[in-house]
Every structure is written in C-alpha cells, then in structure tokens.
Image (cartoon, grey):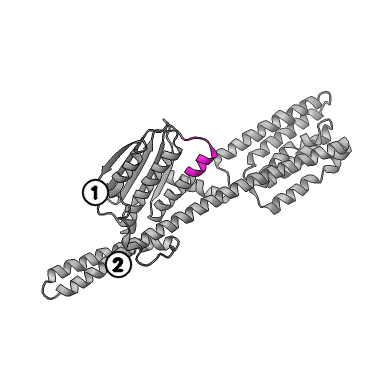
Amino acid sequence: MDRRSRELDDVFAREARGELSARAARALWWGSAGLVLAVLGTSVLAAGAGHGRRLPVAVVLVLVQVCALRWLARAPVAVLAVTAATGLAVWALLPAVTLTGAVLAAQVALCVLSATRPRRVSVRALAAMCLPAPLALGEGGLAGLAVYVLAVVLAWTVGQWRRAQQERTRAEMRRAVVEERARIAREVHDVVAHTLSVMVIQAGAADDVFTQRPEQARQALQAIETGARSALGELRLLLRAFRPDAEEDGAAEHREPGPSLARLDELADTVRATGMTVYMHREGATDGLPAAVDLAAYRIVQEALTNTLRHAAGADEVSVRVTAEGDCVTVTVVDNGRTPQGSSAAAGAGRGLVGMKERARLVGGSLRAGPLPGGGFEVAAQLPVERVS
C-alpha cells in the first residue's frame, strides 16, 4: 500500500504542476507521431516522386520530427525548435509540400507548449512561428498566407483553451483541500476543547480528594496525563490545518454526539435506505482510538460511500471493513459498480478523493483509491495510531 500511496502522491504533485503523467505523455507521442506520419509523410511521398535524392532526405527529416515528438511533454520548446527547422527544410527540398503541412509537427508542439508553459513563453513561440509567414505568401499568395497564419494561431488557441481547463481543475482541487482542512480544523478544535474541559474537571476532583483519598486523586492525575497527551496530538493536527472560523459562544455545547467509528451502523443505515446493500465488517477494538484518527476513519468511510452513491454506475453492493491492529487502523471500502467516464462525475469523485487523502495525510497516514481489475472501485486507507497519541 505504501508504494501505491506514493504513486498517488506523485499523481497529485504532477497535477498541481500541470505536468502530464507517463501514460498521458506516451499517448501524446503516439497520437502526434501518427498524425505527422499520416499527413506529412504521405505528402512527402507523393510530392517527392521523381525528385531522386531529395525524397530520402525529406523522409529522414520527417522521421527526425517524429522522434523529436517523443520529448514533447518534457521539453516542448526544444521540440518546437527542432520540428520547425526540419519542417522548413522539408519544404525547401519539396516545395510541392505546402509550408503549413511541412511544419505540422511544429504546430502540434506549439499547441502543447501553449497548454503547459507560461503565456509569455507561448506568445514568443507564436511570434516565432509567424516569422515564416512571408514564405507562405510567396508560395500561395494571400490564400496561402491566411491558411498558414490561421493554422498557427489555431494551434496556439487550442493550447490556451486546454491551459484554462487545467487551471480551473487545479483551482477546484485547491479549494477542496482548503475546505477539507477548515472542516477538519473545526472538528479537532471541538475535540481539544472537550478534552481540556474534562482535564479541568478531573484536576478539581483530584484537588478535592487529595488528602482523604490519595488513590482516587492518583487515578484522576493519570487520566489528566492521558488526556493531555491526546490533546497534544490533536493540537498537532490543528496546527497543520487552517484556523477554523469562529463560532458563537456555547454553540458546541448543544451539538449532537460527534461522528466516530462507533456510529458506522447509523451511517450504513442511511445508505441502505437508498436501496444499496451495505456489508459492515469490524476487526479489533476501536473504542480507545485517538479522536482525530477515529474521526478521520469515519469521514473516509462516509465520503467513500457518498462517492459510491453518486458516481458508481450500476453499484448495488458496497463492503466496508475497519481493522484495528496494533498501532494502525485500516479502512477499506469496495463497491461493485463501474465508474462513468463523464467529466462531471470524474470531477466530483476527484474532489472527494482529495478530501479523503487530506484527512489521511493530516493524521500521518496514507490512502489509495482506484478501480479494481475485475470491476468495482476500492478506497483503502492506513491510519497510524502512534502519530497522534
């Protein structure tokens, strides 16, 4: 689980930096290479017939462009320079190939550069790509010039559109993390306040019986020590999260009992009311868990069940397993549905996963989530107990 958790962390880090995953980079290369070979390669073979030695040189230049596209996701600026230069060379060797077609690979590189690099860099690249425009004017007149400029500007615009989409997604992810931290901070604030209140009462009781019943006073002092250690762990979590919003005085005193693993059956009943079959399995004792771990485990189960109801198409069964062994609590939620490919569902599930991951991270744990090979979706978290005790 640790290896998969690190992989999930890497995915979130790459998304925050706007980088492509290894799978997406390979798909980009194969797609762009196929496009260049199909369009430019065919044009070169057709235009080079009867040109003797020029055709093999042009073919080699096309293959150079295809190979350069391998590094498109990592170094789009360098790839743009190489593909633009080789494209111009192809056009110089075979003028029958239009200038717009000869620099097709450079247009693809410009699109990726526009989507992944700062705007000032992409604008300079756009200006550089417009420099050969007079060549297109001499080749095909105003129509050739218009086609070339339109193709270059369109490639840059598509990249800008993609960049705007990525920025919106990252903003949603950041907002989800901030909201989750604020909610965690409010809950931890209440837990610490309750613990300190109990400590004050116990200290007063120990003072009252210190002379007459020292054994009872000693028990109260031991309880105070235990509560203080627990409160220190909760405060560490509070400092990691954002400061909670102020609440009205006395509001916490009238709240219902807070969420915890002891109330999982109530949570399962609310899900069963929707027609979903919920299997609940518990192993080990969860009564003495630190409040932060108890709360994090409950919230992870709650969010996983919510994601099942909202995003797992066709799911009618979900299994929840909570295992407390030694210094670790393991939470696993598995459904039998299928995750739809729609953008809205993916975005909603993504925000839910961000919240669960943030809760696990704040207690020093890890979380992994993803579809299973045989169908269904799994959320698995490991929450260490010693980190907050």
Instruction: Work out whether 302 lies above or below 291.
Output: above
The residues colored magenta run 339-349
Q: Which mark is residue 196?
A: 2
Q: Is residue 133 left or right of residue 295?
A: right
State which tag comes first along the sequence, 2 or 1.
2
Q: Is residue 243 above or below residue 148?
A: below
- Image coordinates of residue 52 in percent, x first then y, are 83, 26
80 to the left or right of 334? right
Helix, strand or loop status at disc 1? loop
User: Can residue 2 be seen here?
Assistant: no
Which corner quadrant of the image does residue 199 belong to?
Answer: bottom left
Q: Position of residue 80 (x, y in %)?
A: 71, 43
Where is residue 193 drawn, in percent x and y? 33, 65
As shown in the figure, which amino acid type bears the numbered disc 1?
Answer: Ala
Q: Nearer the viewer, residue 234 or 104?
A: 234
Which residue is outermost to the bottom?
A: 211
Calculate the distance from the C-alpha at mark 2 to the C-alpha at mark 1: 25 Å
Numbered label attached to residue 285: 1
Q: Tell me if I can see residue 73 in this picture.
A: yes
